[in-house]
Image: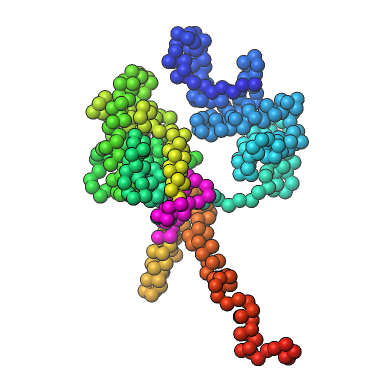
């Protein structure tokens, strides 16, 4: 069994290699409205393997992202089908014992067992596939017998949200030392040459102060941040939808300080990157969305894509389209995305992860220096900047709401509508785009460090250079007149 991913561009780039067969393949993909990078499972005779292919086609029609979601799901399903094939089973004939054995092979028996969190995500995909097969009549029922709310594939581990945040000192250390290439003395590290420190610092500032997810801020376009159009001291607002989680609409706001950091990158580092790729972009302009008009009032882009005039609202442009969006710049065609690389239209998530890992290596190399802040056991993620934004904003709003309540109470004008309108949880929930305020509620537990309270509560109990237990006991007995044989 093999796994492939549909790619129209491969056929269009080499028509002489694929010939009529390639043309027919592209025609069928278009006729069935199948997206590029759709997972396709085939057997040894190159025939589609069902029901896996049909399930992924259904997910594609539901709008699941082919590059991230479907690709991740595909490898999970491939591993499961290969395991079942070794036992002489298929998805339609798999029993509960087969699936439990697969769980055990993944979480206990393989050379590097997966953790509970990773397995639960994998189990969720398998359960979704089995439920879909039942709905489609491909199975009479799921082979898994749930006991109460427990599923046999579940790891059984209960876990909270993995909320990790940075202090101000840690953030500056991450941004300037790790990503920005500075030394602890504030000088520029010569070994960091060519790694675009202004770009990484700008991305860090944008992620922190906007609360956007990595997929949202990394795919931002120049018009969305009003680059070269803003007046000094102005922020920027733009709609998020196609790049947002679950495509849920919300308005992103970027404060002026973060935009200043972005402008610095756009003016100093970005022109050289754009100029280096201008000639290559000109050669492949047919496959790019070449923008000829930017309508700031309607927030739309108009241009040519594969010989057709197309027009898109900014918020409706998915990452795939943004990645090929270009416009005419001083040196020729250049990407319209804010964050580009040397020879790349837009930095991918793997490129950002590589930069983050390199930053962590730089920070851990000097972690023993007394000027370095305390580092966590696990390296930071860019998503931790979103958590930091949520906690800082929630803390600020809660303090402000408390002061507002005190002022209104003294004036005797506290109203329920005002209490709801200025509720910090609701404000932060809307800003983050959470599906429910209950998700935002999880952040409340992180506003204060509970470990500091534990330390303070038992400060007098800790062993130190003070009196011993015998000294304390003897003084206590003497002061109360209590001795051996004394009445109690």
Residue 117: quarter of image:
top right
Residue 57: quarter of image:
top right
Q: Position of residue 144 (x, y in %)?
A: 73, 39
The structure residue drawn at horizontal position 34% and vertical position 36%, both measured from the top left corner, is: 193
The quadrant of the rendering that contains the C terminus is bottom right
Compared with residue 384, is residue 52 higher up or lower down, i.e. above or below? Answer: above
For the residue pair 82 and 461, the one nearer the viewer reads as: 461
Compared with residue 257, is residue 394 higher up or lower down, i.e. above or below? Answer: below
Q: Position of residue 77 (x, y in %)?
A: 63, 30
Horizontal side of residue 230 vs 452, given as left or right? left
Judge whether residue 334 is colored magenta: no
Asked if residue 238 can be seen in this view, the reply is: no
The structure residue drawn at horizontal position 39% and vertical position 30%, both measured from the top left corner, is: 323
The structure residue drawn at horizontal position 30% and vertical position 21%, both measured from the top left corner, is: 279
Horizontal side of residue 95 vs 125, given as left or right? right
Q: Position of residue 277 (x, y in %)?
A: 32, 25
Judge whether residue 382 is colored magenta: yes
| Magenta span of residues | 368-396
The structure residue drawn at horizontal position 29% and vertical position 36%, both measured from the top left corner, is: 269
For the residue pair 461 and 282, the one nearer the viewer reads as: 461
The quadrant of the rendering that contains the N terminus is top right
């Amino acid at each position: 069994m093999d796994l492939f991913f549909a790619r129209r561009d491969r056929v269009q780039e080499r028509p002489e290699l694929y010939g009529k067969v390639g043309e027919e393949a592209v025609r069928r993909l278009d006729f069935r409205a199948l997206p590029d990078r759709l997972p396709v499972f085939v057997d040894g005779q190159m025939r589609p393997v069902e029901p896996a292919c049909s399930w992924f086609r259904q997910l594609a029609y539901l709008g699941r992202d082919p590059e991230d979601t479907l690709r991740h799901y595909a490898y999970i399903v491939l591993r499961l089908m290969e395991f079942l094939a070794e036992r002489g089973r298929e998805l339609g004939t798999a029993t509960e014992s087969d699936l439990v054995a697969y769980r055990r092979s993944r979480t206990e028996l393989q050379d590097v067992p997966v953790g509970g969190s990773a397995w639960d995500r994998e189990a969720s995909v398998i359960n979704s596939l089995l439920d879909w097969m039942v709905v489609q009549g491909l199975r009479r029922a799921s082979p898994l017998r749930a006991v109460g709310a427990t599923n046999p594939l579940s790891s059984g581990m209960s876990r909270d949200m993995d909320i990790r945040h940075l202090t101000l000192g840690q953030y500056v250390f991450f941004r300037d030392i790790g990503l920005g290439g500075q030394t602890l003395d504030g000088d520029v590290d010569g070994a960091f040459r060519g790694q675009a420190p202004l770009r990484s610092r700008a991305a860090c500032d944008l992620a922190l102060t906007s609360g956007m997810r990595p997929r949202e801020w990394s795919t931002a376009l120049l018009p969305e941040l009003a680059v070269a159009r803003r007046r000094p001291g102005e922020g920027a607002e733009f709609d998020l939808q196609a790049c947002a989680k679950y495509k849920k609409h919300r308005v992103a706001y970027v404060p002026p300080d973060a935009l200043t950091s972005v402008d610095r990158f756009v003016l100093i580092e970005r022109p050289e990157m754009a100029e280096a790729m201008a000639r290559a972009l000109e050669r492949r302009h047919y496959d790019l969305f070449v923008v000829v008009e930017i309508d700031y009032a309607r927030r739309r882009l108009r241009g040519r894509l594969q010989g057709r005039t197309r027009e898109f609202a900014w918020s409706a442009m998915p990452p795939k389209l943004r990645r090929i969006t270009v416009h005419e710049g001083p040196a020729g065609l250049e990407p319209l995305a804010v964050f580009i690389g040397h020879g790349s239209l837009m930095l991918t998530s793997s490129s950002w992860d590589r930069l983050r890992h390199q930053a962590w290596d730089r920070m851990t190399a000097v972690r023993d220096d007394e000027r370095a802040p305390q580092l966590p056991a696990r390296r930071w993620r860019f998503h931790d900047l979103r958590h930091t934004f949520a906690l800082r904003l929630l803390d600020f709003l809660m303090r402000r709401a408390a002061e507002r309540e005190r002022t209104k109470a003294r004036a005797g004008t506290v109203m329920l509508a005002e209490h709801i309108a200025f509720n910090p949880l609701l404000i932060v929930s809307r800003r983050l785009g959470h599906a429910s305020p209950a998700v935002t509620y999880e952040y409340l537990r992180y506003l204060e460090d509970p470990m500091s309270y534990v330390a303070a509560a038992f400060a007098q109990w800790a062993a130190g250079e003070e009196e011993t237990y015998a000294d304390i006991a003897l003084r206590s007995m003497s002061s109360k007149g209590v001795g051996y044989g004394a009445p109690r």
